[in-house]
Image: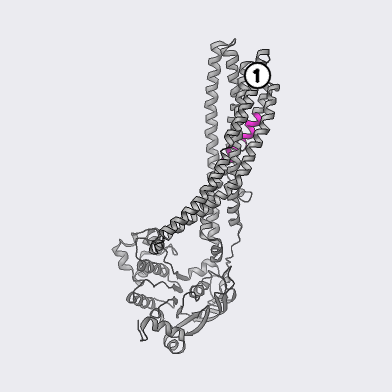
Amino acid sequence: MKRLLKHLKGLYKESVLGPLFKLCEATLELIVPLIVASIVDYGIGGEGGVGHTVFMSILLVLFGAVGLGFSVVAQYFCAKASVGFATRIRGALFDKIQTFSYSDIDRLGTSTMMTRMTADTSKVQNGLNLALRLLLRSPFVVFGALIMAFIVDARSAISFAVVIPILAVVVFSIMLISMPLYKRTQNATDGILLRTRENLSGVRVIRAFCQEEDEMAAFSEANTHLTGIQKKVGMISSLLNPLTYVIINLAILWLMELGAIQVSDGVLSAGEVLALYNYMSQILVELIKLANLIIQITRALASASRIADVLDIPSSERSGEITEGAGGDVAVSLSGVSLTYGGSSEPSLSGIDLTVRRGETVGIIGGTGSGKTSLVNLIPGFYPATEGKVLIDGVPVEDYDVVALRERIGIVPQRAVLFRGTVRDNMRLGHKDATDAEIAEALKVAQVYDVVCEKGGLDAIIEEGGQNLSGGQKQRLTIARALVGSPDILILDDSASALDYATDAALRRAIKTLEGERTVFIVSQRTSSIMHADKIVVLEDGEAVAVGSHKELLGSCDIYREIHESQFGGGEQVG
């Protein structure tokens, strides 16, 4: 938690005023039993009579009103501090995640980061809110009630000094036993949430393979496990109230017996015995509150530790200072490049040598898992090369300023990702100042302009993930998004898989007609998509087994020829 306290900066006033007003409320609460004692001793059965009773009753109402005001103000400041704290933590987490490289995200996992942003942050917020309200108030009331009891009658207050340690032992023993179980419950809950998230995101796959029954059985098993832990911790926690009430009631009986004797002897008044009873009740309530508070704080501290662990992870993405290339004819050069993903012992790419001149179109083909996406991910520096050098315009990728480098590269990933909003908003994702004319031109090149017009133009709404679009429409929109801003290097990572051959061919022809010497990388499973490329790289098991034109590879590369013949039956196909 110490590592997160810096995010309280600017909220110190609220963090101090909240507990301060709570202590003011607690002070009034400690005075109330004395007022009740005065009503009993001097009002109802004493010299003060009705006048004293009415006056003290009005004073009680006034104390209640003022105490309510203190409580409301305290709650306002505590809520403001805790919500502000949680807001800053979420912001810090989001900012941190944005700095992570692909390797960092792969290592952490999406579900882990989502849990930190949501459940863990909420637990920290609730824990801080409760701590500001009760961490000082509960001990203050317990010890204040003990002191007030000694002020009323030292002999009777000895029972308080005996009961409080016994209560503390019971309360904190139950708490210490239940805390590890609460942690297990939290972990089991995370497992339930992960399974639920996977089922929701993969519902189509589950139904396609008729796995509903198996998934329900697996969920039921995990849910039963969670229920078992919750029952166990619930049974232990349920002992708290009965045991504490038994102890406190025995203490009250003892107090009443001593009080009755002392009242009979004239040492104590009835009002003073009632005050002692009220103080004993206050101690009981506050000890139970304190036990629950510590459990909540323990949960919050565990969540805070997980959040801090993410914030403390150094980003592996490095940004240089160079914003312009060295120039020359060579746009991209890979020399002896190898790539091994974190946690993997086998390289995904090894010994890649490739020189691409400005304005060339490069096709990349190979079997599943051959390293096609890994290769193009090296160009914008998504992953650092384990060995060798990747040069863009003669400058190593790692020496470029990250923003400057990626502004020059238009990327269409394998999975078409669109965000909820208008078409215009999605097209301007990488270029905020793009004009409607530039967007329209990109849409035309991507063969999706007519589709956008039919749906209402640039103001048409795209649902989350592009759910109101077909697969081909989503792919073409992501291609258009990459074309906005006229990037020097365009990477199409198997981004035409959902397009028919005619649309794919029209798209490639339109890209060829774009102004400027644009270097294009096309990753594809289809030879028809890359046969007109200036050079084609054939990958197998992370190695470039052949580089050449379509005709050259048909004659010299068995792998390429087999892929082509499997798609076109051995006949030459021109697209």
Q: Is residue 1 magenta?
A: no
Decide which of 169, 40 is in the foreground and name it.
169
Q: Is residue 142 magenta?
A: yes
Q: Quarter of the image containing the C terminus?
A: bottom left
Looking at the rendering, the stretch of residues picked out in magenta corresponds to: 130-144
**What amino acid is labelled 1 in the image?**
Gly
- Residue 232 coordinates in the image, percent (x, y): 56, 44
- Residue 237 coordinates in the image, percent (x, y): 57, 40
- Residue 321 coordinates in the image, percent (x, y): 58, 68
Q: Secondary structure at mark 1?
A: helix
Side of 262 where 490 appears, left or right: left
- Residue 486 coordinates in the image, percent (x, y): 42, 71
Say how many tags the image has: 1
Q: Main secondary structure of the magenta part?
A: helix
Against 90, residue 169 (above or below) is above
Decide which of 388, 115 is in the foreground and name it.
115
Q: Is residue 277 visible?
A: yes
Name, please, the residue furthest toward the bottom: 555
Against 161, residue 456 (above or below) is below
Residue at 44% x, 59% y: name it. 214
Against 458, residue 329 (above or below) is below
> Dot 1, crowdedness within 10 Å: few (<14), some or many (≥20)?
many
Residue to which mark 1 is pinned: 259
Name, please, the residue furthest toward the left: 454
Residue at 59% x, 9% y: name it. 47
Residue at 55% x, 68% y: name it. 401
Side of 363 where 396 appears, left or right: right
Against 155, residue 110 (above or below) is below
Q: Is residue 8 visible?
A: no
